[in-house]
Image: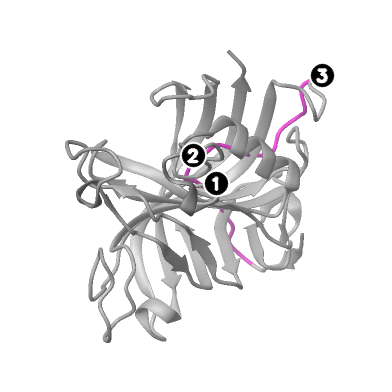
Amino acid sequence: MKKKIIFGIALSLVLVIVSSIFTAVPAIAGNPKDSAEKTYYATIGRVFLQLPSNATYPAKAGGTPNHPVELLITVFDGGRRSTDGPYDQLIVDMWDPIAAHFTPVLAITDNPSQADFIKKIYNNTYLWYPSPTPLIPMYGPNLFPNVVLVQPNELEVWSETKGTDNGYGHKGGFSYESKSNVLKVNLTKAVKSTLNLFIINASAPSFTPARYTNATFNLPPLNMVFHELDEGYPNEQTEVLDSWLGASRYTVKETWTELSARVDIKIPDWTGLFGLDFLGQTRENCVAKFYPP
């Protein structure tokens, strides 16, 4: 986790795993690392991407590499006081035509405890499905092994701050006496999202070709910078993870300060050498509490 010196301005992360949900504040007494109840602190960045591609599903040869054309990316600069300690995290959501909303299909983190918790709360989803029906054993013991643990230097998410931090950018920690105004992301390796049985037609009989498509893709190395655009406003949300079969039924309570952001993105393997600009958001002072059923 790294520090950067800057002279001037400063800011903060969103997305969610499903969102998603983490930041830096005082730890809750009586909430040890292996507790079922967990608290996360983070600066979060979130952005919807509409990207050029020669196809959505299935892939076609030649031209721009095939990949989903609409993605929601959420990144986390997780604070040291989180239950599982500091973490960098990136979650990719893709449009689910059956549910008619974005659904998480890839979670990348550098914290092993965090990876285990994501598997637990999003079990039986496109992120993690370790118990496939015996009718489809050819796809292995896990249909969707899309919670990926990487090394700290392979995914870096950090905020650059000013104010009482005296011009220092802090990685893995957030100062509540200063205001962050830049959130940076660096993914240095390609990470695969395995989606061999992505459902596109729920009315078709189970285990027939008409029901599924292979939506597998590789997320290439990328760089992102979130620039704050306004003063922001307080926000909060409570969600129960119970909308799918075998759901964990955890209750998630989040509070944060929401700001609009301009997002500069470079994904050379998908878009060439030139970057793209999008409108997104950051969430500063994000506190997410997970309560078991």
Give the spatial CA distance, label 2 vs label 3. Answer: 39 Å
* Residue for badge 3: 29
**Separation of disc 2 and disc 1 at Cα?**
7 Å
Q: State the mark number for residue 132.
A: 2
Instruction: Give the Cα separation between the discs numbered 3 and 1.
Output: 36 Å
Element assignment for label 3: loop
Closer mark to the observer between disc 3 and disc 1: 1
Relative depth, front residue between 16 and 28? 16
Q: Is residue 144 magenta?
A: no
Q: Are marks 2 and 1 in contact (CB under 8 Å)?
A: yes
Query: Which residue shows up at 63% across the image and 58% down it?
Result: 157
User: Disc 3 residue type?
Assistant: Ala
- Residue under label 1: 142
Does residue 74 show up?
A: no
Residue 281: percent from left, percent from top: 42, 49
**Which amino acid, by three-letter code, is at mark 2?**
Pro
